[in-house]
Image (spheres, grey):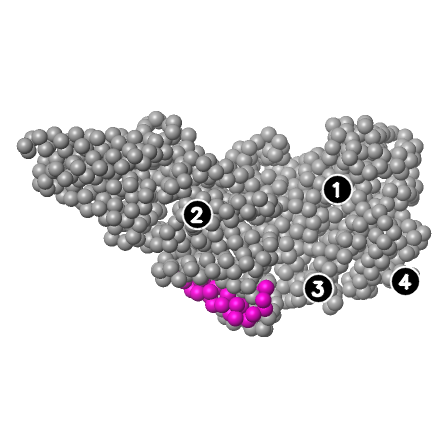
């Protein structure tokens, strides 16, 4: 009878294993049911202590784990632990199956920890996995999977205990397992997945970018190595999606976010509706869709994010360990929906979710600080909506608890500080309650020495802390915090990103430079104020100028290295056209390594580093006027050829007032086609010019010589860069046009670069004019404008209408020194480099223009609408057509701040060229435009909207 029972038990075990394999391959619940039933019968017919009992028990433990994973039965989890331990205890120390049994014990306790969060289960899991590996044959097929299990257990131990050694062990174990396995090994995808997760988690903890990049690589390898319809593919797709999300969060490449959405969408599609992991995939997909909606503004993504987030919460029992995380994710999505909709219901639902999460979260939970902060942000929004002080105090309390609950080395600590100081600022604005000086100084000291998770977080926390310090009068600490943010600003938009990604990254920090300049001026440091403005504005322009730096000096020191730098520089300059993200990053690393090598050479330590003020001063006959409007003060700084910058206090200038003027002017000048619109444009423009004179230009010109026209380059910061400072004044009274010849520059460096370029020795004129552009209104005056200019220039090329294609224009630009465009232009407020000039076959975008290298270009006259305008969010980057033609190589550019009347634009262009002498000198262009604008003012004194738009940019 005993022999017969042993045979029956063996047969039932084989039947169970076959059914379990069928379930793992197909997901068939019937097969899972058969697997459990057969293993249960094997145990029932085999007494404890009998030879086949351990095999039956360990098989039952295995299939119960499968059922618990699939159906979420807690009793199965407990039973799996009991049967696995029983089976292991029954084996002899030299049993060849010992590694398998130890591994099953580890898996059972791991599942128990995930379900019940008992630390003892986690410790036992690690012990068992270590014993399984130690008992395994070195290089055996199963070592990879067991090593992956041990690596994952160490990751969980880090989550539970916060000891970074667990993550180092996880990475070490996973890398060793992968290295020891041949290609095609069955357990290779398992080991790769574990290594990917360990690398990702260590990046979360330390911010090491090499871990994140390597996580992407091994995650992609794990997906590729997964064969056929392996059910494990779903988890690997999900894991890889989250790695791409991490990298997007750190670097900001939109392509990473799109990859993540695609991968997790595939994972959801492959997951059965009743699968226990589906809720997690849905919740994570909600995160990705929310992040993409934040990036693109797509309402459909945000609606889908709410839908999948709600489905994830609805499918997860409240007592499930991940229920709190799914609810938190939905909270954040609800908050984003509220920001868009301003629907109080969305905000109330977010707060309700946050309170549920907070009530159920243990005091020692690692996510507690972040969840406290999330709820605090929601209450701050509630206060902003209702003005109820109780909501503000609740927001402060939650933010303070979040910071106290996180140690300074917590990965989210910098984010928590930033959100707390956002709340402190709201409290100060509402009540005047100040943060203590000692506390503020402690935070600023910490910011100086902390290692952020990303440059974005360093900039964000420095900006928020510095802005509050400015507001409460702690200007020294404000300057320190804001300087840290400004120094990090270029790192927010690393060169390996696409132009769109870099523009988006920088736009999130609008207003930072204004606060930094104000802080330095508040402590009387005009030089540092100028340096902060120079470092924080025109980040993309400075990066582009780095790629145009003359290498002749380097060639004198090391000709071979100069050649390598030139070659590497040319490769990165054309990378947007012929390289994907990974190749682009590699090219930039190669280039930056060469730059570092140059700085090691004698006399080259400052190679491509930001120049100092003395290298950037204007010529002796002029002055640069930097104008800044912050929340608490307004100032101008006069930067001359010698001496320190001269501050001019502007007591009536504030940031909010500047924004109001920009919005009013933009709305008035954009409206066309009716008498009422024309009347509004003239009145609003006149009001803005008067405000500019009273608030800014009047005090500035009072500081200039009164006996002559002064050469002035305006360098306005933030929204001020969208206003016509050069035309400021009251109708019928002397204004800036009567006291100065004005130009504009985005940065001192850009002006110095234009000054240093040798002027063109000949005039080879290119004229592009389109009286009719497909899909756009006609511009009849452009033909006469082009003909008049062609008659005036003997060496000329004229491209009219259908001849003015992008290819022909780009070719002609390479041989011309003077260029005149008379056509339509447009701007793109979300991605400025997509704006451009409209030619016969489409738009010639800003991004294409900035990529040109025109060494002999002198003048670009842009007789088109709004060619010097960009969005408020991008104002400090000056991404518009005027700056694009400067970067292409033109020393002088004529443009406009708002749309031009066709006939006025034509007359102004003709007059401008008549005002130039037969053989113009480099300094003749700005005065010529100055005389044109004054003449138009005399002709149309009550129509400033017709003439105040014209500007000159250049030396």
Q: Nearer the viewer, mark 1 or mark 3?
A: 1
Given contact means CB atoms under 8 Å apart, are the residues at marks 2 and 3 in contact? no
Whichever of labels 2 and 3 marks the residue nearer the N terminus, that label is: 2
Q: Residue furthest left?
A: 1
Q: Nearer the viewer, mark 2 or mark 4?
A: 2
The residue pinned by badge 1 equals: 826
3D distance between C-alphas at marks 1 and 4: 34 Å
Q: Callout 1: helix, strand or loop?
A: strand
Q: Give yes or no for residue 396 being in the magenta stretch.
A: yes
Q: Looking at the figure, which quarter contains the N terminus? A: top left
The residue pinned by badge 3 equals: 654
3D distance between C-alphas at marks 2 and 4: 67 Å
Q: Give yes or no for residue 778 being in the magenta stretch.
A: no
Q: Is 506 on the left-hand or right-hand side of 149?
A: right
Which label is found at residue 733?
Answer: 4
Residue at 56 percent of width and 41 percent of height: 254
């Amino acid at each position: 009878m005993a022999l017969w029972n042993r045979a029956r038990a063996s047969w039932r075990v084989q039947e169970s294993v076959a059914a379990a394999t069928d379930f793992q391959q197909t997901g068939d619940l019937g097969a899972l049911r058969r697997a459990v039933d057969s293993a249960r019968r094997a145990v029932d017919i085999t007494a404890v202590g009998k030879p086949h009992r351990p095999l039956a028990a360990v098989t039952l433990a295995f299939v119960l784990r499968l059922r618990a994973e699939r159906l979420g039965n807690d009793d199965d989890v407990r039973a799996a632990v009991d049967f696995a331990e029983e089976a292991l205890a029954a084996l002899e120390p030299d049993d060849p199956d010992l590694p398998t049994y130890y591994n099953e014990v580890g898996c059972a306790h791991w599942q128990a920890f995930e379900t019940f969060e008992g630390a003892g289960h986690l410790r036992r899991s690690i012990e068992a996995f270590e014993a399984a590996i130690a008992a395994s044959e070195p290089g055996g097929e199963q070592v990879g999977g067991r090593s992956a299990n041990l690596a994952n257990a160490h990751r969980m131990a880090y989550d539970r205990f916060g000891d970074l050694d667990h993550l180092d062990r996880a990475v070490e174990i996973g890398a060793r397992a992968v290295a020891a396995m041949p290609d095609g090994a069955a357990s290779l995808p398992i080991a790769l997945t574990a290594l990917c997760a360990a690398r990702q988690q260590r990046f979360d903890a330390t911010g090491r970018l090499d871990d994140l990049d390597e996580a992407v690589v091994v995650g992609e390898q794990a997906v590729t190595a997964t064969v056929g319809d392996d059910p494990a593919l779903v988890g690997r797709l999900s894991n890889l999606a989250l790695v791409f999300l991490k990298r997007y969060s750190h670097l900001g490449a939109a392509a990473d976010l799109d990859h993540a959405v695609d991968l997790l969408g595939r994972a959801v599609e492959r997951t059965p509706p009743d699968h226990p992991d589906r809720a997690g995939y849905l919740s994570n997909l909600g995160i990705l869709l929310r992040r993409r909606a934040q990036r693109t503004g797509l309402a459909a993504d945000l609606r889908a994010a709410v839908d999948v987030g709600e489905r994830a919460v609805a499918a997860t029992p409240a007592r499930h360990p991940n229920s709190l995380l799914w609810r938190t994710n939905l909270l954040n999505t609800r908050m984003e929906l509220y920001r868009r909709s301003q629907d109080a219901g969305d905000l109330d639902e977010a707060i309700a979710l946050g309170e549920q999460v907070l009530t159920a979260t243990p005091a020692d939970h690692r996510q507690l600080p972040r969840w406290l902060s999330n709820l605090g942000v929601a209450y701050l929004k509630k206060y902003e909506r209702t003005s109820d002080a109780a909501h503000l105090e609740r927001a402060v309390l939650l933010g303070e608890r979040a910071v106290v609950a996180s140690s300074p080395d917590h990965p989210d600590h910098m984010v928590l500080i930033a959100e707390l100081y956002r709340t402190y600022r709201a409290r100060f604005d509402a009540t005047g309650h100040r943060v203590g000086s000692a506390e503020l100084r402690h935070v600023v000291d910490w910011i100086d020495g902390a290692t952020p998770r990303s440059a974005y977080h360093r900039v964000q926390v420095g900006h928020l802390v510095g802005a509050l310090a400015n507001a409460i009068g702690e200007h020294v600490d404000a300057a320190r915090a804001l300087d840290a943010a400004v120094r990090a600003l270029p790192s927010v938009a690393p060169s390996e990103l696409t132009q769109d990604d870099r523009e988006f990254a920088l736009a999130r920090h609008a207003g930072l430079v204004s606060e930094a300049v104000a802080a330095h001026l508040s402590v009387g440091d005009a030089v540092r104020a100028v340096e902060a403005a120079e470092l924080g504005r025109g980040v993309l322009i400075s990066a582009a100028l780095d790629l145009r730096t003359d290498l002749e000096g380097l060639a004198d020191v090391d000709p071979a290295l100069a050649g390598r730098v030139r070659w590497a520089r040319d490769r990165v300059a054309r990378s947007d056209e012929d390289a994907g993200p990974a190749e682009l990053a590699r090219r930039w690393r190669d280039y930056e390594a060469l730059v570092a090598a140059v700085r090691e050479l004698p006399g080259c330590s400052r190679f491509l580093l930001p120049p100092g003020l003395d290298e950037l001063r204007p010529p002796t006959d002029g002055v640069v006027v930097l104008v800044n409007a912050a929340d608490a003060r307004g100032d101008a700084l006069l930067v001359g050829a010698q001496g320190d910058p001269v501050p001019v206090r502007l007591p009536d200038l504030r940031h909010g007032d500047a924004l109001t003027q920009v919005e009013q002017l933009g709305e008035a000048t954009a409206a066309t086609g009716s008498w009422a619109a024309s009347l509004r444009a003239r009145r609003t423009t006149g009001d803005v010019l008067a405000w500019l004179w009273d608030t800014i230009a009047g005090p500035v010109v009072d500081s200039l010589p009164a006996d002559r026209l002064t050469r002035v380059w305006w360098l306005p910061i933030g929204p001020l860069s969208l206003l016509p400072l050069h035309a400021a004044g009251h109708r019928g009274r002397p204004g800036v046009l009567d006291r100065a010849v004005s130009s504009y520059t985005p940065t001192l460096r850009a002006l110095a670069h234009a000054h240093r370029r040798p002027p063109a020795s000949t005039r080879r004129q290119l004229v592009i004019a389109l009286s009719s552009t497909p899909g756009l209104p006609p511009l009849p005056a452009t033909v006469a404008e082009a003909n008049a200019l062609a008659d005036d220039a003997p060496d000329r090329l004229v491209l009219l209408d259908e001849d003015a294609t992008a290819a022909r224009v780009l070719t002609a630009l390479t041989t011309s020194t003077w260029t005149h465009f008379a056509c339509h232009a447009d701007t793109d407020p979300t991605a400025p480099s997509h704006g451009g000039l409209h030619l016969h076959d489409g738009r010639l975008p800003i991004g294409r223009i900035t990529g040109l290298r025109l060494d002999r270009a002198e003048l670009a006259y842009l007789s088109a609408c709004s060619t010097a305008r960009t969005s408020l969010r991008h104002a400090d980057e000056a991404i518009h057509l005027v700056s694009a033609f400067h970067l292409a190589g033109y020393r002088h550019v004529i443009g406009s701040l708002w749309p031009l009347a066709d006939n006025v634009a034509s007359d102004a262009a003709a007059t401008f060229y008549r005002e130039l002498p037969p053989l113009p000198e480099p300094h003749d262009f700005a005065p010529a435009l100055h005389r044109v604008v004054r003449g138009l003012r005399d002709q149309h004194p009550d129509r400033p909207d017709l003439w105040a738009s014209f500007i000159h940019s250049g030396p």
